[in-house]
């Protein structure tokens, strides 16, 4: 029992240490980026501080992925209930949860991974600012095959720095999530174009009603 307790304490310290570390140090890679680099030989990935990203891009990705980002503590209970009620395979996963899964964990649907995500998400919400959470998200998100992070995505699809993205370009980039290998921001299908229009409307809405206040 004593060794079990000690092991639990050590694991807890390591976990909190990892959460604190990446609150100030940029994660060098993720499991997905590493795996794609091994598969492809190289990936496009360059870190961009949040201040170097156009505000329209930040609002677009929040509107697309987690409109209540500024109002929850890591879990959007309304979205979770809606996903359960609809039987959706995907839904209710917040930006904070996605950051935890990609930075600290791995890609599967095992109960172990979900349990660890449930433990780590409140820790990240407590020890990181909302700006830091969305900054890390924008830098590790996959926007296409071998294209990771908003800096690489802006340059790959539109030939501009992330600070120079227009509202339409931002909406198109957000619209390829969460299926970036099946969608294109520079050559959008009708479905992606429709989603981009909805995202632009959503981005304007969260700015107007204050749901963008925590990261602007």
Image (cartoon, helix red, strand yellow):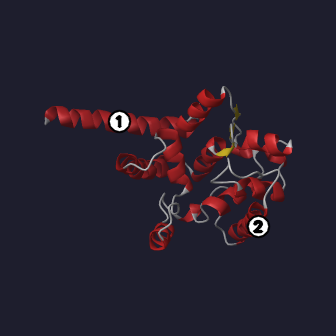
Q: Is residue 84 above or below residue 165?
A: below
Q: Is residue 136 above or below residue 93?
A: above
- Closer to the camera, 140 or 120? 140
Residue 76 visible in image: yes
User: Regarding mark 2 in the picture, which secondary structure is present there?
Assistant: helix
Q: Quadrant of residue 176?
A: bottom right
Q: In which quarter of the image is residue 13?
A: top left
- Closer to the camera, 32 or 47? 32
Q: Position of residue 59 (x, y in %)?
A: 71, 59
For image coordinates 49% across by 68% down, the residue present is 83
Quadrant placement of the C terminus: bottom right
User: Regarding mark 1 in the picture, which secondary structure is present there?
Assistant: helix
Find residue 214 and name its label: none
Q: Where is residue 10 in the image (x, y as percent from the top left)?
A: 30, 33
Left or right of residue 178, residue 106 in this image: left
Q: Viewer-nearest of labels 2 and 1?
A: 2
Q: Where is residue 56 in the image (x, y as percent from the top left)?
A: 77, 57
- Closer to the camera, 18 or 171? 171
On the image, numbered disc 1 is attached to which residue? 13
Q: Are marks 2 and 1 in contact (CB under 8 Å)?
A: no
On the image, numbered disc 2 is attached to which residue? 194
Left or right of residue 80, residue 194 in this image: right
Q: Where is residue 63 in the image (x, y as percent from the top left)?
A: 67, 63
For image coordinates 35% across by 46% down, the residue present is 112
Left or right of residue 3, residue 12 in this image: right
For image coordinates 66% across by 30% down, the residue present is 40
Around disc 1, counting alpha carbons within 10 Å, would you say few (fewer than 14), some (14 to 19), or many (20 or more)? Answer: few
Left or right of residue 102, residue 198 in this image: right
Q: Which badge, 2 or 1, is on the more N-terminal residue?
A: 1
For image coordinates 38% across by 33% down, the residue present is 14
């Amino acid at each position: 029992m004593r060794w079990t307790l000690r092991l639990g304490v050590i694991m807890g310290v390591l976990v909190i240490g990892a959460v604190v570390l990446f609150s100030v140090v940029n994660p060098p890679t993720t499991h997905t980026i590493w795996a794609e680099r091994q598969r492809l030989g190289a990936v496009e990935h360059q870190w961009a501080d949040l201040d170097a990203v156009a505000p329209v891009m930040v609002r677009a990705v929040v509107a697309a992925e987690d409109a209540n980002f500024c109002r929850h503590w890591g879990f959007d209970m309304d979205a979770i209930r809606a996903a359960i009620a609809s039987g959706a395979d995907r839904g209710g996963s917040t930006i904070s949860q996605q950051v935890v899964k990609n930075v600290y964990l791995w890609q599967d649907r095992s109960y172990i991974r979900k349990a660890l995500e449930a433990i780590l998400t409140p820790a990240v919400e407590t020890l990181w600012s909302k700006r830091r959470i969305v900054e890390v998200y924008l830098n590790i998100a996959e926007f296409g095959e071998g294209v990771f992070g908003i800096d690489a995505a802006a340059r790959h699809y539109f030939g501009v720095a992330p600070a120079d993205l227009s509202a339409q370009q931002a909406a198109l980039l957000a619209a390829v999530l969460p299926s970036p290998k099946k969608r294109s921001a520079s050559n959008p299908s009708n479905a992606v174009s429709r989603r981009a229009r909805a995202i632009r409307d959503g981005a304007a809405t969260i700015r107007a009603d204050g749901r963008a206040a925590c990261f602007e």
